[in-house]
Image (cartoon, rainbow, N blue to C red):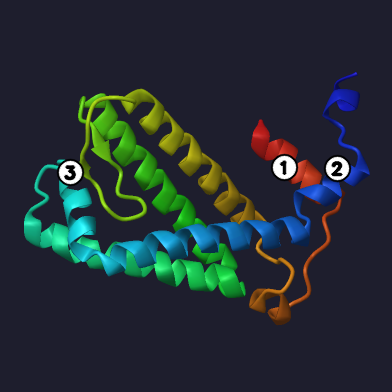
Amino acid sequence: MANEMTAVKPSTRRIWGHPVIGLIFRIVLAGILAFAGISKLLEPSGARSAIIAYRIPGMTGDIAGVLGWLLPAGEVLLAVLLLVGLLTRWAAILTAILMCAFIIGIGSVWARGYSIDCGCFGGGGDVSESGKTWRYSSEILRDLLFAGMAVWLAVWPKTLFSLDRTQSQPRECDDSDELEFQEAAR
C-alpha cells in the first residue's frame, strides 16, 4: 500500500525535469533580475536609500552605497547567465540565495515593525503603514516562488536553448531520479 502511494506515474516523472519548464523558469527569472537590476542601476541613490531603510546594524551610508551598485550589477549578471543558459546551476543557486536573503530582509523589517518599500525594483525607503501586511506577505510569497524556480533550475540545469546544453547532452529523468527525490524528501 505504501509503495502505491509513493509511486509516481512515468508521465509525471518526465515533467519534473522537462527542459521546456526549465526554459520558462530561466526566462522568467532572467527578466525579473534584469528589470530589478537595471532599474536600480539607473537610480543608484534609490538603491542606497532602500538598503538603508532596512536598518541593518552597522550598515553605514558608504557600505550601502557600494551595495547599491554591487547588488544590481550582480542581478544583471545573473540575468544574463540565466537568459543564455550558461553556468545555469551556479546562477540558479546564487539566485535562490539572493531570494532567500530578500525574504529574510523583508521578514526582518516586518517583524521589527517598520513599513518600507522593499526597493526590489528601484525606489525604496519608508512608506505609509497602510497595507503593510498585504505588501510584505505578497513580497515574501513572490520571492518564495522565484526561489522555488531557482532551486528547480539548480536541480535540472539543462534546459532548451541553453549554452549549458551544448556542453553535454541533457540526462533524461529515470527511475533513479524519482528514488533520489523520494529519499531526499524523507
Q: Where is residue 75 in the image (x, y as percent from the top left)?
A: 40, 64
Q: Name the residue under label 1.
A: 181
| Residue 110 higher or lower than 70, as above or below | above
Check disc 1 and report its element: helix, strand or loop: helix
Q: Where on the picture, by quarter, is residue 114?
A: top left
Residues at badges 1 and 2 in contact (C-beta under 8 Å)?
no
Distance of label 3 from label 2 (alpha carbons): 45 Å
Check disc 3 and report its element: helix, strand or loop: helix
Position of residue 24 in the picture relative to residue 44 (left or right): right
At label 1, which amino acid type do we have? Phe
Position of residue 60 in the picture relative to residue 169 (left or right): left
Residues at badges 3 and 1 in contact (C-beta under 8 Å)?
no
Q: Position of residue 120 (x, y in %)?
A: 35, 50
Distance of label 1 from label 2 (alpha carbons): 13 Å
Q: Earlier in the sequence, mark 1 or mark 2?
A: 2
For residue 12, the mark is: 2
Please report the residue visible at 34 percent of the width from the left and 25 percent of the height from the top: 131
At label 2, which amino acid type do we have? Thr
Please report the residue visible at 21 percent of the width from the left and 57 percent of the height from the top: 46
Of the residues tagged 3 and 2, which is closer to the observer?
3
Q: Where on the picture, by quarter, is residue 67?
A: bottom left
Q: Mark 3 points at which residue?
A: 53
Residue closest to the eye, 89 or 29:
29
Of the residues tagged 3 and 1, which is closer to the observer?
3
Position of residue 122 in the picture relative to residue 6 (left or right): left
Check disc 2 and report its element: helix, strand or loop: helix
At label 3, which amino acid type do we have? Ala
| Residue 59 higher or lower than 114, as above or below | below
Q: Where on the picture, by quarter, is residue 185?
A: top right
